[in-house]
Image (tube, helix red, strand yellow):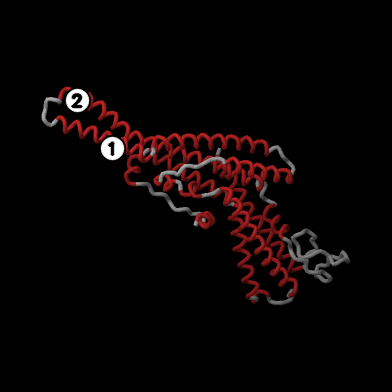
Amino acid sequence: MDDYFMKRLDISLNELRERQLTYENLEDHNVEYGSGDNSPATLSHSSGSGSGSGSGSGRQFRKLTYNEVSRSFDQYDSSKYFNEMSILQTYFNGQKHLYTYSKNVTYRKLNMLILPTLFLSTSGTIMVPFISHFEWSSGVISAIYAIITLLLGLVNYFRLESSYQQFSSLADRYDKLQTSLELTNSKLIFIENGAELERSVAANIREFEDKLSDIVNVIVPEDVKRLFPVICNINIFSFIRKIDANKRGLIIKYKDIKNEIRYIYYKNKDRDRDKDNRLQSLIDAKERLRIEIIQYKDVYNSIDVEFVREIRMAEDKIKNWFWGLLCGVSVEPINNPIIQKYLT
């Protein structure tokens, strides 16, 4: 099911890129030749005469607004209201796996100390009657009980038993949050009004943020942190706000560059624009911003991919847990530049 939705998402993103590029070319063509199209993305409306002559005479230059540019990127994105809820669900799933893995690692460490303690304690009790008449018996028995004391001291020092219970409790709480969020997402599907849907999504995000503020997270072991670098270090609500702010800033820059390009077309219709270095630099900058904005639209999917990759790597490490416990674990670097920029 996950692979199916991932493929559908990739197809949708490719269609978005192709349609957006076609839209850009058509819009520049309309600006250059004074098309009479009265859509919000064209150069300008009529100055009042209502004429739409092909020469563009009588037209006044009108700047594109932020909403118009933003809609040009959002018109093919039917799931824009669910992006935040989807990444929140992915985050809860990642946190559940993080604390479940921490619980399992702590449980193994606890067993590695408790089982030898039980074995030595039982063996020492059985051996005492048989070796008590030897001179070296007191030394052996003292050594056995010294090792037992050391192992129990390590258990108390690292607080393995209490950590195991805390990790188990946190894993259960995040599992319940994930289930609750899935039910919430199911209800949102039936809301057809866009404004109402947007308000509901914002309200649900605030509700789950309040629920998370009541959870006191426990320090995750260092070997587990190395295995889950993104899941451990990301603050999902700060990430959502930062992504939205950065995307908004990019769209503003894109709008300004777009308006300047349109103004050059408007003022210099008969000029050889192929030799205009300023125009060419603006077109190049516009294309770079367009690609970056589309990357921001794909960032939630990229976070989901990173979470799934880390979870699968952790599952593979379970098979070699003893070697990983002794030598540590290595994690592949993050490939997405936007996620790297946020985490650094």
Q: Nearer the viewer, residue 1 or 329?
A: 329
Q: Secondary structure at mark 1?
A: helix
Q: Which residue bears the numbered disc 1?
A: 150
Q: Residue 91 in the image: x percent, y percent? A: 54, 43
The residue under label 2 is which amino acid type? Met
Q: Nearer the viewer, residue 224 or 275?
A: 224
Q: Residue 21 in the image: x percent, y percent? A: 65, 59
Q: Which mark is residue 96?
A: none
Q: Residues within 10 Å of mark 1 (few under 14, many from 20)?
A: some
Residue lying furthest right: 49
Q: Nearer the viewer, residue 274 or 88?
A: 88
Say which residue appears at 71% left-offset and 45% top-offset.
199
Q: Which residue bears the numbered disc 2?
A: 127
User: On the rendered structure, is 180 left or right of 314?
Assistant: right
* Real-space Cα separation, disc 2 to disc 1, in angstroms: 20 Å
Q: Nearer the viewer, residue 182 or 44?
A: 182
